[in-house]
């Protein structure tokens, strides 16, 4: 191969590399994209207590030594995969809309309008010293969403009804 041919191939390879580099710089990496907010910001800490209270039953679960136990209504071992599924669903619930107290007053609505004065499900979970209580109310009239609210907050959140599965 002649020197001039090698030199042209080298320049072509450098040009193609530079073009690829420029394109990569314009594409925003996935780790820098805006992350859609979720109802529960993070369950990064290990959840060690979960209580689910519906109008018909209540179950208390606790995790000790990497094993889940049912504490109520009966005592026994719990299915860790089912609990992980519930916690995974909670962690991935997207925030579709946040309704503030001011917006509720402007619309002449209250918590009863969202099914949150007598919620159909009440969930309490604890991760370390952090305890959270979530109220799950009625389905939204439009779309496949349900209203939820943290007990300590005035805001109502519309989220996916996957939480009910």
Image: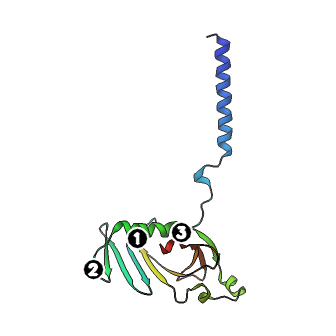
The Cα–Cα distance between marks 1 and 3, rounded to whole angstroms, is 17 Å
Mark 1 closeness class: few <14, some 14–19, many ≥20 residues within 10 Å: some
Q: Nearer the viewer, residue 65 or 113?
A: 113
- Mark 1 vs 3, N-terminal side: 1
Which numbered mark, 2 or 1, is in the foreground of this view?
Answer: 2
Residue labelled with disc 1: 47
Residue 142 in percent (x, y) is at 64, 76
Mark 2 closeness class: few <14, some 14–19, many ≥20 residues within 10 Å: few
**Residue drawn at (44%, 84%), measured in percent from left and top?**
54
Q: Residue furthest top?
A: 2
Q: Which mark is residue 145?
A: none
Q: Which mark is residue 75?
A: 2
- Quadrant placement of the N terminus: top right
The Cα–Cα distance between marks 2 and 1, rounded to whole angstroms, is 19 Å
Residue 157 in percent (x, y) is at 59, 76
Q: Nearer the viewer, residue 29 or 108?
A: 108
Q: Secondary structure at mark 3?
A: loop
- Mark 2 vs 1, N-terminal side: 1
**Residue drawn at (33%, 69%), measured in percent from left and top?**
79
Q: Secondary structure at mark 2?
A: loop
**Residue drawn at (63%, 79%), measured in percent from left and top?**
141
The Cα–Cα distance between marks 3 and 2, rounded to whole angstroms, is 30 Å
Residue 77, picture quadrant: bottom left
Residue labelled with disc 3: 93
Residue 115, picture quadrant: bottom right
Left or right of 64, for residue 41: right
Residue 129 in sight: no
């Amino acid at each position: 191969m002649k020197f001039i041919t090698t030199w042209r191939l080298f320049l072509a390879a450098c040009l193609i590399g530079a073009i690829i580099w420029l394109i990569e710089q314009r594409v925003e990496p996935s780790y820098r994209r805006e992350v859609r907010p979720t109802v529960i910001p993070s369950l990064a800490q290990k959840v060690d207590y979960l209580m689910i209270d519906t109008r018909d039953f209540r179950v208390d679960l606790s995790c000790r030594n990497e094993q889940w136990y049912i504490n109520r209504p009966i005592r026994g071992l719990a299915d860790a995969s089912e609990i992980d599924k519930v916690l995974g669903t909670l962690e991935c619930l997207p925030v579709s809309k946040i309704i503030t107290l001011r917006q509720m007053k402007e619309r002449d609505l209250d918590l009863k309008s969202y099914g949150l004065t007598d919620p159909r499900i009440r969930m309490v979970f604890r991760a370390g010293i952090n305890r959270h209580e979530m109220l799950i109310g009625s389905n939204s009239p439009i779309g496949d969403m349900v209203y939820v609210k943290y007990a300590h907050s005035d805001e109502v959140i519309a989220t996916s009804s996957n939480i009910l599965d």
